[in-house]
Amino acid sequence: MKEIIDNKKYKNNTYTYYLVRNKINGIDVFGMQITKKNRHRLKEKSCIKNIFVNKEKTVNILKILSRNLVTPIALKEIVEDILI
């Protein structure tokens, strides 16, 4: 299941930041996805699933990513830096 956390427009592109939720052994686990669209056409997409069990922490990180206009290409590297 995905939930939109934020949308950002930059030049002709729209970046959408999603909270991704899955269940593993009955426990909610969260991840994130970023898409980049240009005139409603998907140009880039990156998703990291099942990295947190805390929804609030995941949403807060997504808001930071959105504020800093992190792109799909940079998502995995930025999240890795946050987790280390």
Image (tube, grey):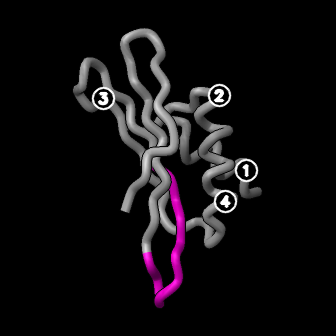
Does label 4 or label 3 sit earlier along the sequence? 3
Q: Amino acid at mark 1?
A: Ile
Magenta stretch in the rendered image: 23-33
Q: Nearer the viewer, mark 1 or mark 2?
A: 2
Residue at figure coordinates x 60%, y 45% from the top left: 62
Q: Secondary structure at mark 3?
A: strand
Q: Nearer the viewer, mark 4 or mark 2?
A: 4
In the image, what residue type sits under mark 4?
Glu
Query: Which amino acid does the dot numbered 3 rest on?
Result: Lys
Q: Position of residue 2 (x, y in %)?
A: 39, 56
- Residue at the image point whose x is 38% and y is 19% from the top: 13
Q: CA–CA distance between discs 4 and 2?
A: 19 Å
Q: Quadrant of the N terminus?
A: bottom left
Mark toward the viewer: 1 or 4: 4
| Label 1–label 4 contact, CB within 8 A | no
Label 3 neighbour load within 10 Å: few <14, some 14-19, many 20+: few
Q: Position of residue 66 (x, y in %)?
A: 59, 34
Main secondary structure of the magenta stretch: strand
